[in-house]
Image (tube, helix red, strand yellow):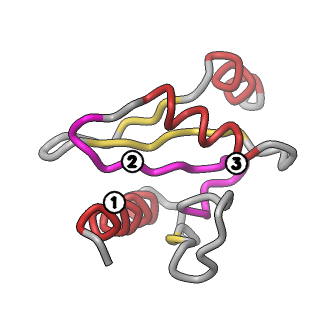
Amino acid sequence: MTNSKRKGKRGELELAQFLRLHGYDDARRTNQYCGTEGTSDVVGLPGHHVEVKRTERLRLRAALDQAIGDSEGTGLIPIVAHRQNSTEWLITLRAEDYLTTIKRRR
């Protein structure tokens, strides 16, 4: 396994743990189970397709485009969960999708 794959795996495991700490008990990394391209990196966040990036230099638009492409036809909202060393997790999604998310709460 290459260094970047190990870092990606660690990032996915970290995010799954973060989600579980916040009440999403079913959150888990998917690649260890199926390894299929186009699947969400982490499942257990209802209604969302999660692309995880654990890197110091993120090509955010490319990451979001990957999430959008991978989630096409699923009905899931594509998001990128990302963080750098010594920082908190951030979530990036399209403004339209964010508005859809908050409208569901009304």
Q: Residues within 10 Å of mark 2 (few under 14, many from 20)?
A: many
Quadrant of the drawing holding the N terminus: bottom left
Residue holding disc 3: 70
Tell me which numbered mark, 2 or 1, is placed earlier along the sequence: 1
Q: Nearer the viewer, residue 42 or 1?
A: 1
Q: Residue at x 68, y 57 (%)?
A: 38
> Callout 1: helix, strand or loop?
helix
Going by the numbered disc 2, the residue's amino acid type is Lys
Q: Which residue is mark 2?
A: 53
Contact (CB < 8 A) between labels 2 and 1?
yes
Question: Residue 53 at x, y = what percent?
Answer: 39, 48
Q: Residue at x 43, y 56 (%)?
A: 22
Taking the spot 15% from the left edge, 46% from the top edge, the residue there is: 85
Alpha carbons under labels 3 and 2: distance apart: 15 Å
Where does label 1 land, which residue? 11
In the rendered image, residue 46 lying in the magenta stretch gets the answer yes
Disc 2 from disc 1: Cα separation: 7 Å
Of the residues shown, which amino acid type is indicated by label 3? Asp
